[in-house]
Amino acid sequence: MKIGIVGAGFVGSTAAYALALEGIGQEIILVDINEALARAQAEDILHATPYTNAIRIGAGGFESLSDASVIILACGVNQQEGESRLHLLERNAAIFREVVGRLVVVAPRAVLVVASNPVDVITQITLGVAEYPAHRVIGSGTILDTARFRSLVGQHMRVSPRSVHAYVLGEHGDSEVLIWSSAHLGGVPLLDFAKQIGRPITDEIRHTIDDGVRHAAGRIIAGKGATYYGIASGLARIVRAIRDDEGAVLTVSGRCSSAHPDVAGVCLSVPRIIGAGGIAQEIWPALSAREHEELVGSAEIIKNAAAQVGC
């Protein structure tokens, strides 16, 4: 598999490094408006391959992506301290319209994975410009928020986060919805599990975990200027599911089907089955009445933001 990455900044280059470390793909090509940056990142990552996996890594222009199976879109400008993801919209919408317009010409069969923020609206813009089938445009969505949720629940329970099955749905941003009602560990509902091991989920614990998930990006950006390790691993996970036609269930952003009229047509995150062609199917976990209401509210925020840029 050949993988293209448009945008060689923090997220794009770290995603390339994560892919190389995990041995995902045979070739990775970095593309950036700053060609020197793309070449430097590719060369630096290449020097790690003798200790990881034998993957070809290089840099090039858009034409070098013509035979790429998957293209990660990590271009655009970064979120600034104190800036919500939705405030990035005007700055990144124009960039994506140009980039996606060029990719449609050179790589009409690739699966596009959108990483740039605000990712749900940018995914919707990408779908509109590319006019690809909806299953071939995937936003990274809440894959990182879900990982944060699971890691914090696992930390509280003192179990591996891999044993935690819990989702964050909706917007990748301030209105995201942590789904507590259907969370479970090892087949046991979360609250029952917590009671059995003597580590109950009190209102205080729930608030702490919610804050830890919802405001993680702001704290990280305040401390070091950008988030990139977590999302890079999430992007590598998505690409691995595509490469292996895995049928993995991941919380990624995509256009919601008409089966759920309250959010139909909006790009937001729900669990989706990911395989070789991209999104195979969307899955809806059981939601409490409050969670459903919050998810509809999150969809409205995304819909209104998308309308501001005509999509």
Image: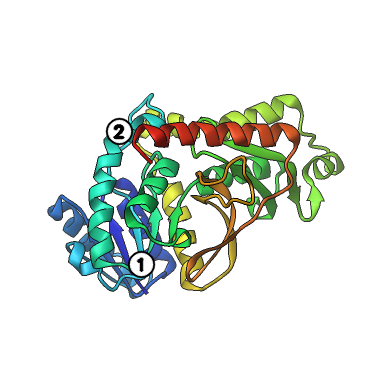
Residue 196 visible in the displayed image: yes
Horizontal side of 308 relative to 243 (left or right) equals left
The residue closer to the viewer here, 236 or 73, is 73
Query: Visible in this render: residue 79?
Result: no
Residue 142 located left or right of residue 3: right
Amino acid type shown at disc 2: Glu
* Residue 272 percent coordinates (x, y): 58, 57
**Above or below, comparing residue 235 to residue 2 in the picture:** above
Q: Are marks 2 and 1 in contact (CB under 8 Å)?
A: no
> How many C-alpha atoms fall within 10 Å of the one at disc 2: few (<14), some, or many (≥20)?
few
The kind of secondary structure element at disc 1 is loop
Q: Quadrant of residue 209?
A: top right
Residue 223's spot in the image, x, y percent?
39, 30
Residue with the mark numbered 1 = 110
Label 2: which residue? 90
Which structural element holds mark 2? helix
Q: Nearer the viewer, residue 93 or 82?
A: 93
- What number of labels is visible? 2
Considering depth in this image, is 133 or 150 the residue closer to the camera? 133
Where is 176 relative to 25, above or below?
Answer: above
Quadrant of image for the N terminus: bottom left
- In primary-sequence order, the first of circles 2 and 1 is 2
Q: Quadrant of the C terminus?
A: top left
Tell me residue 114's x, y (percent): 39, 52
The residue positioned 70% from the left and 49% from the top of the image is: 285
Amino acid residing under circle 1: Ala
Whole-number angstrom distance, CA of label 2 to CA of label 1: 26 Å
**Residue at image coords 44%, 48%:** 231
* Mark 1 residue crowding within 10 angstroms, few (<14) / some (14–19) / many (20+): many
Residue depicted at 42% across the width and 32% down the height = 305
- Residue 101, position as x, y percentages in the image: 25, 55
